[in-house]
Image (tube, helix red, strand yellow):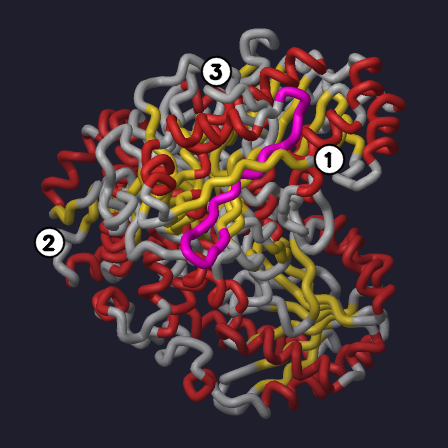
Amino acid sequence: MNVTTETKNEAAAYERHGGGDAHHYWQGEFIGDEEAGRRLAGLPAAVEAALATVLETETVLAACDALATALCDPDHPVRARLAAHLPAGEDPAVLAELGGLLSRRELTRKLRRELGGATPGRLNRADPRETVYEAWAPVGLVVHVAPGNAVTVAPLSIVEGLLAGNVNVLKTSGSDTLLTQHLMAELAALDPGGALAARVVVLRFPSSRQEWLRLMCAPADAVAVWGGEGAVEGVAAHVPAGCRLVEWGHRISFAYLTDEAWSDEVTLGSLADDVCRYEQQACSSPQVVYLDTEDEEEVFAFAERFAAVLAARPPAVAAGAGPADGPDPAEAAELTTTELMARLEEHLGLTRVFAAPDGSWRVMADTRSPLTASPLHRSVWVKPLPRKRLIATLRPMRRYLQTAGIAGSRSDVAELSRTALAAGVTRVTPVGAMQESYAGEPHDGVYALQRYSRRVAVQADPERFATTACLDDLVRPVVLPAPAGPLLGKEDVQGPARELARADAELYFRSGGSTGAPALSVFSYDDYDTQMHAAARGLLAAGYDPVGDRTANLFYCGGMYGSFISFFSVLERLGGVQLPLAAGPDHKATAEAIVEHRADTLFGMPSYLWQLLHAQEEALRAYGGLRKVFYGGEHFTREQRRTLKERFGIEAVRSITYGSTDLGPLGYQCAESSGGVHHLHADLHTLEIVDLAEDRPVARGETGRLVFTTHARRGQRLGRYLIGDLGREVPGHCPCGRRAPRFELMGRTGDVMRVATYFLNHRRFLALAEEEGGHRGELQVRLEAARARERLTVRVERTPSTDPERLREVFLSGYPEVGSAVAEGLLDLVVEAVDGASLDRSPTSGKLLAVVDARR
């Protein structure tokens, strides 16, 4: 159809549908023509206002995923509302297809493939060893001119623009229904913050309304056009200098068969599938079948065989493969003309035509190799093209080539794929799969998200920004969608973890079991990678230097426990020097390796590092090269940290991360943090703090149960998850300059014991032992049931200054509840000094068990 006719038909359809009604969606509102025209005049200001606000990638992903769930549910009211706007004759199943493309899984894969990560807009270090920060920034305003023959293209084009962070103005055809407008309204409604609505405008008007098209394009930074050369040229006339024109034009695809393949009936059936699917309306549908031969008779013989295969296919309507009304008058005229011209050339021996009596299909064999466009609707050219002439024949048409479906032996496919790509083809598939695609697949040889983005960089002073992994952390906190739903405990997530789809269950870990039976946690590799990058950024904030530090990784390994593997991965992403020693019983061999390879930084569990340093104190103090300790899983007490600095010369003792096996890294320390104070990994999680007894928020600064909701997780979903730890919010901005929220860990719920009618806390015993009793080692509480009363034994690590009787008096006088329970004859209090190695620990992680309850 020529452009003039198309524009006239589009304008007529627009008038029939009532062009002046509220057929436009503008930043959250449905408006009419008059208001749309007025707002178009002020489009530059509207764009500037929208770009001044922040659009988090997670906001787009969460809203799209919620909409995808609704679209895939036949009974969901959202799907019912949108189905009312489908074009006449369109199968409602297309909404479920669209839902699959909008799911978190597919969009996250697309982001990773095209922009390298799930949060491409954050200014993270391009190389952890340099203070150079790079990100993908939006181009600004993207104008989309959508086609009228594919209902999913328009909304998906807008979603691509949103994923890149842009403001999007889309023009639909004047003959289109309002599906895209209402679909965008449903999407925006899933973002209470309004950031999505602010970035979406959908206008429905005919191409003859050139003034509107001019006003749309004038402030654009990129214009994406879907359609043929005429459509592209009509829009390009309005594209300003310096604006990026993204052409998603018509393309030609072909099949290429070797002699081994064209004699195979299965291959012919697969080829017929490619021809009949979508009635060749897709750019990836084969219009020409090339045979690897110079023999004209082989071409004619193949065409006759393939015609018989097409003849056996059900008609388009019965197969549900295309529009019920078939080709329009202009298309029908082109079909007739093409077939008649081919039949005329039969007399010259150039062609041979095989066609259905009712004109529903046609195979046209042609002895000439140059690419010829098909009139579509099951119309196929068959031509000879020996592989040695493939590049010379096809390269002149390289601007129009898209898919080559290749059939042959494995070596043929490998060789011909390279040749076809050199000729200008952008994608190669097996025959029978030419219309199939995968998430994040390049379109017409480019990644859409990169076309809608700019790669930007910031170079910063190496000394001032040495511990800054992400510049955005210094500007504002990440705001993620608010958590919803009930509070969940470990028992609520263990069952679902075992039932995850295989694609999401790629990496299995078990917890250390320090507070109960080891729990299973499952990750996709994408999720794991996201979390390891986050942990790496946190480690930089804590003062790790990937250029200068030489690290001994001394976490526990094996038994599906994840700490050693995780921090191996973190160091790998940081490019840091690593000795992957792991925690082991041979402290002498470990110390020798540290000295021999000049490690100056230790990663490990506090209880293990404490044992190692004291067991090999003489050798490690003589070495004198230890400078940093990064610990996880437990805490070094204040007195223990003082001992490490005074006795071993260690300059920095900081948490390597605060996290859990199931949630991954949750918080990180900076150079201004100490003890249990951490910044939240706010780009991964949201944190709530709820009352100890009731499921309600605590007042600011009060201690409560920590509740985390993980957002950046494709696999196991963990929303409002009670991790089992206690903590409090740390108010105010951190002196380090980061805007991520801070919290202080106050122990675990399991550290609180119900003993002799009182609630006692392990951390209170530890604090009293340090502050009043001068104790610097580890401390464990053991509970036992005696005949007349309960027994509480405080087991402390033996040091030269340990005085059990002195510590007992400290607990009785400094802990009133303990003193009362003993005085009332309800409790026996015992203090024992023991070797550190005899304290009870988790067999998997090596963690010290703070409380051992042997009363059960």
Give the Cα separation between the discs numbered 3 and 2: 59 Å
Residue 363: quadrant of the picture: bottom right
Query: What type is the residue that disc 3 sits on?
Result: Glu
Q: Which mark is residue 554?
A: 1
What residue type is disc 2 on?
Asp
Residue in the image at 53% along x and 29% along y: 805
Q: CA distance from mark 1 to mark 3?
A: 25 Å
Mark closest to the chain's N terminus, 2 or 1: 2
Report helix, strand or loop for mark 3: loop
| Residue at the spot of label 2 | 21
Q: Which residue is mark 3?
A: 672
Assign a secondary structure to mark 1. loop
In depth, the one of 208 and 778 nearer the eye is 778
Q: Which residues are magenta?
A: 784-801
In-front residue for pair 709/5:
709
Residue 28 sits in quarter = top left
Q: Mark 3 or mark 2, which has the lower sequence index?
A: 2
Residue type pointed to by label 1: Leu
Q: In the rendered image, which quarter contains the N terminus?
A: bottom left
Q: Mark 2 touching mark 1, by CB under 8 A?
A: no
Nearest to viewer (mark 1 / mark 3): 1
Residue 686: horizontal and vertical position, in percent?
37, 40
Q: Quick one: SS at disc 2?
A: loop
- Residue 24 vertical position relative to residue 456 in the rendered view, above or below: below
Depth order, front residue of 106/674: 674
Location of residue 212 in the rendering, given as x and y in whole percent from the top left corner: 24, 39
Q: Residue at x 69, y 42 (%)?
A: 838
774 versus 826 height, above or below: above
Number of marks in the image?
Answer: 3
Residue 226 painted magenta: no
In the rendered structure, which disc, 1 or 3, sits on the residue that comes first in sequence? 1
